[in-house]
């Protein structure tokens, strides 16, 4: 009854961008307690920037969201669906790999070191997942890929191999590759940390464009200026915990916690 | 004051630095290198001279037998043994490699045990075992394990000489192939699998499209070594009286006593075909080097 009155445009919007709920997530690597009870909500369409010193668990947190890293306890859900598990009563059943892979097609991930497939051309890199995971016809996927390449400013590089590109160009291809699945959520793991300083700008510009388009994004970065400009929420992590979070003006300009202040004074 | 004294200094810098004759670079001489070259050249010429003039090589006999039907058929058998041994060996080897990479300790141990056993036993011993399979198992049957059987074969008929040889070569080859494939897979950057997994690419496709083509770069040189050594190793099969190149040549010189020229016939074929394999290797490697800068 109510579904009849739902605006189709609003429904389409809901389908293209996802919210994220992280509840009491713990993760250990051997004796190392990397995540010590993380709770985090990201509203659909928002950009969340995660800051923190290295070893604070930011990258691990990001990797639990698409189940590249299994949590020890707690839950992660994207758009109301548990990631990596199926809940029945009080039990969490781990999903089969095939189902986890299917979930990941809704979540784009961009790595610090790009991880483009070096033996495939730029176009083949982008087309691979839509064709093999979503069973899109190759022609259609290629047309979509070329549009994406145009969007990241690399329309003329479709036939190039990754090693023929600069770091900044490779990362833009990696972003296009993640976008090819039309994910409702984009995760960026220090996308500019492996780049020469003069190439950082071109990648951040692409990410800013995406932020404006209304896709939910979680960005782990050290670029404070980018956080200030683009983030709806800034999260500061230290030693596996979220120390504080809030709008950039609040967290970056008048942090409440000593550790946030100490960190910002070092990076600013 | 300073104005009058300064200009001459700058003019001196602008002038040609040396007005004298051009300097000639004299490279250091290596007299002993020339001695070494001379000695080696003399030895080489002596060797070639011996090949041509020594009547013991009997080049006319070599020429007469090089392309006779018996020899050509034997070459064909050798190629078949190589091809089937390689194909089956690498097929089993790939399975073993992924067993060794699997998360299951049981599968890992079984693959490890197989590789341990088949690398430890000399090929010739293995071949003789397979040849005598019929002595160990009178018949093979398909059915419920330890239960009733639906189909059964007589081993003497099933495992003929040729299939025993192929089986022996392949099972031996599989142990080495497994390690080569595993090494290749381990050489692929972990990030590649993570990227493929994060894109939701199905597991089998990750292996076929992302991992194996990259692993091929380190697999190929070793695999080519193995194929070439298997190709020459087929000569061991002569102990089973299979008419491959080396056995057939032995049969012929057993009859006519022309040992040396007939060994040269076999040698020439082995060298010729190994060269062909090396050329193929070059092109296959070039194919898998796509997108790489070295």
Image (cartoon, coloured by chain):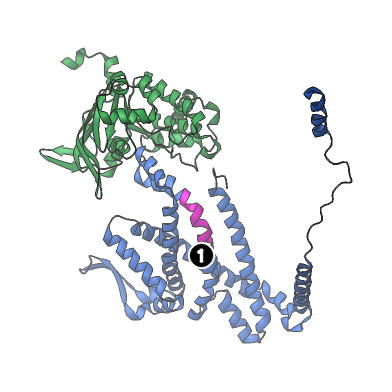
Q: Is residue A241 magenta?
A: no
Q: Is residue A184 visible?
A: no
Magenta extent? B214-226
Label 1: which secondary element: helix
**Where does the image place residue B196, in percent across and percent down from the top left?**
38, 41
| Residue A101 in view, yes or no | yes
Which chain's residue wears label 1?
A: B
Left or right for A186, reference A87: right
Q: Is residue A155 left or right of residue B265?
A: left
Image x and y of residue B27, in percent: 79, 57
Residue A30 relative to residue B44: left or right: left
Where A106 falls versus B273 (above or below)?
Answer: above
Residue A26 placement: quadrant: top left
- Residue at x 61% of width, y 75% of height: B70
Visual hue assigned to chain B: blue
**x then y, percent, for residue A159:** 54, 34
- In percent of the image, x 60 and y 60: which residue is there? B278
Residue nearest the observer in this picture, A87 or B260 = A87
Q: Where residue B245 appears, x then y in whole percent?
A: 58, 74
Picture residue at 26% right of the left edge, 18% below the top: A11
**Count of marks placed on residues:** 1
The residue where tag 1 is placed is B226
Query: What color is chain A drawn in?
Result: green
Q: Is residue B236 above or below residue B215?
A: below
- Please name the predominant secondary structure of the magenta segment in the image: helix
Q: Residue at the left extreme?
A: A89
């Amino acid at each position: 009854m109510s579904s009849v009155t739902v605006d189709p445009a609003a429904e389409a919007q809901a389908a293209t961008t996802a919210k994220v709920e992280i509840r009491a997530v713990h993760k250990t690597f051997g004796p190392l307690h990397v995540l010590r009870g993380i709770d985090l909500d990201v509203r659909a369409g928002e950009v969340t920037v995660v800051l923190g010193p290295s070893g604070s668990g930011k990258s691990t947190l990001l990797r639990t969201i698409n189940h590249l890293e299994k949590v020890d306890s707690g839950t992660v859900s994207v758009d109301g669906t548990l990631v990596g598990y199926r809940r029945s009563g009080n039990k969490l059943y781990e999903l089969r790999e095939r189902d986890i892979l299917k979930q990941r097609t809704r979540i784009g991930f961009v790595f610090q070191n790009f991880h483009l497939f070096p033996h495939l051309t730029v176009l083949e890199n982008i087309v691979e997942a839509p064709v093999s995971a979503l069973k899109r016809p190759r022609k259609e996927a290629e047309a979509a890929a070329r549009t994406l390449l145009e969007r990241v400013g690399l329309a003329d590089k479709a036939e190039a191999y990754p090693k023929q590109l600069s770091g900044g160009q490779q990362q833009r291809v990696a972003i296009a590759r993640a976008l090819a699945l039309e994910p409702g959520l984009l995760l960026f793991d220090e996308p500019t940390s492996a780049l020469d300083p003069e190439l950082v700008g071109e990648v951040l510009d692409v990410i800013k464009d995406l932020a404006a388009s209304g896709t939910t994004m979680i960005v782990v970065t050290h670029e404070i200026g980018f956080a200030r400009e683009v983030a709806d929420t800034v999260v500061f992590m230290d030693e596996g915990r979220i120390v504080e979070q809030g709008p950039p003006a609040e967290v970056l300009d008048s942090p409440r916690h000593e550790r946030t202040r100490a960190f910002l004074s070092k990076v600013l | 004051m300073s104005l009058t004294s300064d200009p001459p200094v700058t003019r001196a810098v602008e002038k040609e630095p040396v007005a004298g004759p051009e300097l000639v670079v004299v490279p250091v001489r290596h007299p002993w290198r020339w001695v070494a070259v001379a000695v080696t050249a003399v030895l080489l010429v002596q060797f070639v001279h011996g090949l041509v003039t020594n009547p013991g090589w009997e080049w006319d006999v070599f020429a007469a037998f090089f392309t006779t039907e018996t020899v050509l058929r034997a070459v064909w058998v050798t190629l078949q043994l190589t091809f089937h041994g390689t194909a089956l060996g690498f097929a089993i080897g790939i399975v073993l490699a992924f067993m060794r990479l699997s998360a299951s300790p049981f599968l890992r141990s079984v693959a490890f045990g197989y590789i341990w056993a088949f690398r430890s036993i000399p090929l010739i011993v293995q071949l003789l075992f397979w040849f005598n399979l019929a002595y160990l198992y009178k018949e093979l049957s398909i059915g419920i394990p330890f239960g009733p059987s639906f189909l059964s074969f007589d081993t003497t008929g099933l495992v003929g000489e040729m299939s025993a040889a192929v089986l022996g070569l392949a099972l031996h080859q599989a142990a080495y192939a497994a390690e080569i494939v595993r090494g290749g897979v381990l050489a692929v950057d972990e990030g590649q699998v993570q990227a493929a997994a994060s894109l939701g690419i199905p597991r089998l496709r990750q292996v076929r499209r992302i991992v194996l083509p990259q692993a091929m770069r380190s697999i190929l040189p070793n695999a080519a070594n193995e194929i070439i050594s298997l190709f020459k190793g087929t000569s061991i099969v002569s102990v089973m009286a299979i008419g491959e190149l080396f056995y057939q040549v032995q049969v012929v010189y057993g009859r006519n006593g022309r040992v040396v020229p007939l060994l040269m016939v076999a040698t020439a074929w082995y060298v010729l075909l190994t060269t062909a394999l090396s050329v193929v290797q070059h092109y296959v490697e070039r194919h898998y080097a796509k997108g790489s800068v070295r």
